[in-house]
Image (cartoon, rainbow, N blue to C red):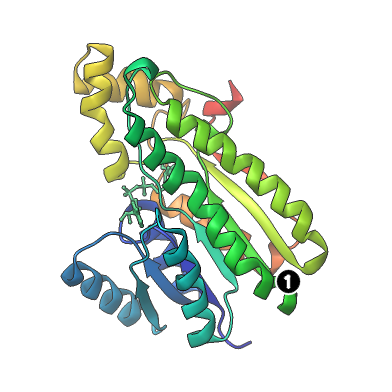
Amino acid sequence: MTSRLAIVTGSTSGIGLGIARRLAHEGYAIVLNGLAEPDEVARLRAEIAAESGMPVEFDGADMTDPAAIAAMVARAEAQFGQVDVLVNNAGIQFVSPVEDFPVERWDRIIAINLNAAFHAIRAALPGMKARRFGRIVNIASAHALIASPYKSAYVAAKHGIAGLTKTVALEAAEFGVTVNAIAPGYVLTPLVEKQIPDTAKARGITEEEVVRTVLLAAQPTKRFVAIEEVAALAAFLAGDEAGSITGAIIPIDGGWTAQ
Ligand code: NAD
């Protein structure tokens, strides 16, 4: 098999970086993406390429820019001949009561956490359908299935991702293209670390109480989901054996949404 190409959006940090590393180790050529300093990008590219022996490119497309997202997919197709796997992972969070939610924060979360996946899918799907193979993995959240207070934009975007996932899965089903969403519970990444102080402020409790009584209280396993666990699920969904899994929203949340 010639090596497959995977684009992972938001892969300069956290879950996306873990998925990119895992896919590279499994023999995929990788296009990294994210907002990161050139030095950091160079370091990550060199590190993953050295560990895996696979080509690792970077595209700095801003996920708020539809034209840049389409250009990222077009460049990958021109360079590698195909995009086999698209992981829509880039995401941001903001925590505030809805009546105080800054309008520009709402717009930015919907743009990055929902609209960017639409733009990337719209650009990548024609090539996947033509080649009769493709894997689209959207990184949703437990918040694609249930809500928490003070996260209106994030929960709305993630529920939107669930709907987009199911719809495109139906449209692509006869073309060898699967579309699924992974719905992680809490994973200790910079995204979660940053929201701890805001949640403490919104709820009037200490940061330690946020971790114990808000974050991990929801997760029956009482531990954060590991980045590597999410990456392993993404890699499985990307592979040939997952060909009959499509339109699924798959929780990996330590039992959170079972309650
Ligand atoms: P993170 O903050 O560690 O990483 C986010 C990535 O997105 C970074 O690479 C960042 O550069 C990139 N990004 C942000 N804005 C961008 C933009 N405008 N254009 C391009 N890239 C941009 O976050 P994470 O926790 O790894 O989150 C990754 C995904 O997982 C998100 O969609 C998030 O909603 C989802 N998720 C996270 C958790 C969790 O507990 N950490 C749980 C469920 C779902």
Tell me if I can see residue 158 in this picture: yes
Left or right, 1 with reference to 117: right
248 vs 79, nearest the viewer: 79
Residue at the right extreme of this rendering: 174
Q: Residue at x 25, y 29 (%)?
A: 196
> Would residue 125 be found to the left or right of residue 185 on screen?
right
Q: Position of residue 218 (x, y in %)?
A: 44, 22
To which residue does mark 1 refer? 129
**Can residue 247 be seen at all in this image of the molecule?**
no
Q: Secondary structure at mark 1?
A: helix
Q: Picture coordinates of residue 217 (x, y %)?
A: 40, 20
What residue lies at 24% left-to-right and 37% top-to-bottom?
194
In percent of width and height, residue 242 lies at 70, 61
For the residue marked with disc 1, what is the amino acid?
A: Lys
Count of numbered circles on the image: 1
Residue 169 vertical position relative to residue 252 in the rendered view, above or below:
below
